[in-house]
Image: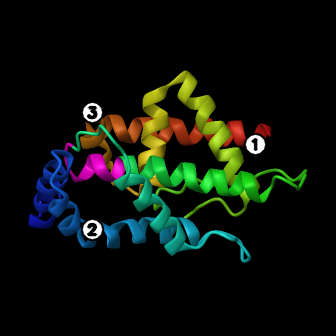
Amino acid sequence: MPSSSVEISRLLRAWGDGDQAALNQLTPLVYAELHRIAHRHMRGQLPGQTLQTTALVNEAYLRLVNVEGVRWQDRTHFFAVSAQIMRRILVDSARAHLADKRGGRLPHVYLDESMDASPQSSEDLIALDDALNALEEMDPRKARVVELRFFGGLSVEQTAEALKISAPSVKRDWKLAKTWLTRELSRR
């Protein structure tokens, strides 16, 4: 584990123990990574989206620092929670954007192994969220794998570490979840 990961993990635990100075030191270390994750999601959005990359990062960061009762285990745990928060923000924004619209087009969401793909519209993101919620009811672990890999940008190894499972299990869950989600989205 690189020294920055060790330092981030140490600062997260200190912050979790109530050390506000640790949060001040932590902020510049995690902000760039949060921005990278948000940028990857936002670059696939259609022009005219009201939510911008920096706004997504800032909103996620504000929610993260206001989370109470979380015992941060390490860097991976922090970015796993970040992925959940960013997913909620993006979906909430998409739902708000579509509140006054009714669309009939089919969603086209591609879950790419390279993580370069992202939903191309609010409808796509909402469809993906709905399908992911359905998958979570059937198989929570596969849903978490998708959330961590797709929304969080975690590698296979980082996902395995966060879920405390093997890398081959992550690869298998990822493959099966992508297949299931693709089939589910094509039905909508």
Q: Residue 27 carries which label?
A: 2
The residue lying at 38 percent from left, 51 percent from top is: 66
In the foreground, 181 or 53:
53
Segment colored magenta: 73-80
Q: Does the magenta stretch include residue 75?
A: yes
Depicted 164 relative to depicted 87: above or below: above
- Outermost residue on the bottom side: it is 47
**Residue at mark 1:** 186
Disc 1 residue crowd, few under 14, some 14–19, many 20+, Cα 10 Å: few
Majority secondary structure of magenta residues: helix
Where is the N terminus found, in terms of image quarters? bottom left
Distance in Å between CA atoms under marks 3 and 2: 29 Å
Q: Position of residue 28 (x, y in %)?
A: 26, 73
- Outermost residue on the top side: it is 138
Q: Is residue 146 magenta?
A: no
The residue lying at 15 percent from left, 48 percent from top is: 13
Depicted 121 relative to depicted 36: above or below: above
**Residue at mark 3:** 165
Q: Where is residue 187 in the image (x, y as percent from the top left)?
A: 78, 37
Q: Mark 3 against mark 2, which lies toward the viewer?
A: 2
Element carrying mark 2: helix
Three-letter amino acid code of the residue under disc 1 = Ser
